[in-house]
Image: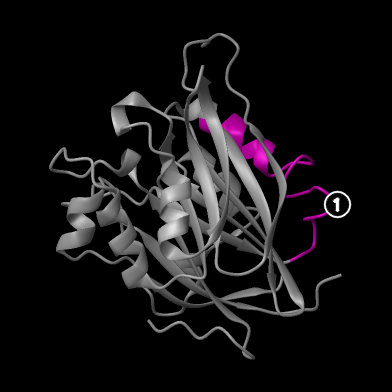
Amino acid sequence: MESLTGSDRTLRILTYNVHGCRGTDGRLAPGRIIDVIREARPDVIALQELDAGRARSGHLDQAQAIAEALGMAFHFHPALQHVEEQYGDAILSRLPLRLVKAGPLPAPHNRPLLEPRGAVWAAIRFGDVELQVINTHLGLLPQERVMQAEALLGLGWLQHPECRGRPAVLLGDFNAWPRSRAYELMASHLRDAQRSLPGHRPRATFPSRWPMLRIDHVFISGDVVVRAVEVPRGRGERLASDHLPLVVDLVIGGPAT
């Protein structure tokens, strides 16, 4: 794929679970994540499993380091925070962006030890269009994922007045494969980018060495059309994280208000 941002309203978006920048060889190497992203040349990036200030990753703010290396603005949401250590998700963009919302997602009350999950929502200005982008990382339990999917589809997020009826993308690591309840719930309200492209065979993203599961997704709504899809899986991608990146070219239409 070749990025075609410009008058035809094509925008390249990438979602990537970076596994705390720890590769499949066990080595902590943010530079490899940066190289993978740079090779894909995205305009907008959704990253999951980022560390900030954590001892295990040298106290580096990974979202900030990646954004600075790529010359992008960013917003980071710590789904998990303990004293000064944070862990969560971020949206990066080479285009103007504003943070709309960042916050937690629900979990079963009878499972208090589950890892907290959240989402971050930014509005990306692309010419005279504003694209609503929501990045998330859902839980590991089926019941948990359904609750979180329902929340994202509800008034606090996709049905919020600032998002409802506008060009929007919900993307990230959903831990939900096709035919799972959470996936089917989202696919009943949104369009799966990999299934929206005629002639494209959906590709798995996990695990990166031998991808078998399609759990990283890009869902679209409103005046958004998929132009191209790619799951890069060269040596660098297989080494940098336990997930492969998912890259989608989108044609965005309709004026922003």
The residue located at (30%, 62%) in the rendering is 36
The residue where tag 1 is placed is 161
Horizontal relation, residue 171 to residue 203: left or right = right
Looking at the rendered image, the quarter that the C terminus falls into is: bottom right
Is 163 one of the magenta-colored residues?
yes
Horizontal relation, residue 243 to residue 98: left or right = left
Mostly what secondary structure, the magenta segment?
loop
- Whole-percent x and y of residue 104? 63, 30
Along the line of sight, which residue is nearer the eye, 171 or 144?
Answer: 171
Horizontal relation, residue 189 to residue 230: left or right = right
Q: Amino acid at mark 1?
A: Pro
Q: Is residue 218 above or below residue 174?
A: below
Quick check: can you spot residue 176? no
Horizontal relation, residue 89 to residue 155: left or right = left
The residue located at (59%, 44%) in the rendering is 185
Start-end of magenta stretch: 145-166
Mark 1 neighbour class, 10 Å CA radius: few under 14, some 14 to 19, many 20 or more: few
The residue located at (46%, 46%) in the rendering is 63
Q: In the structure shown, which secondary structural element does the residue marked by tag 1 occupy?
A: loop
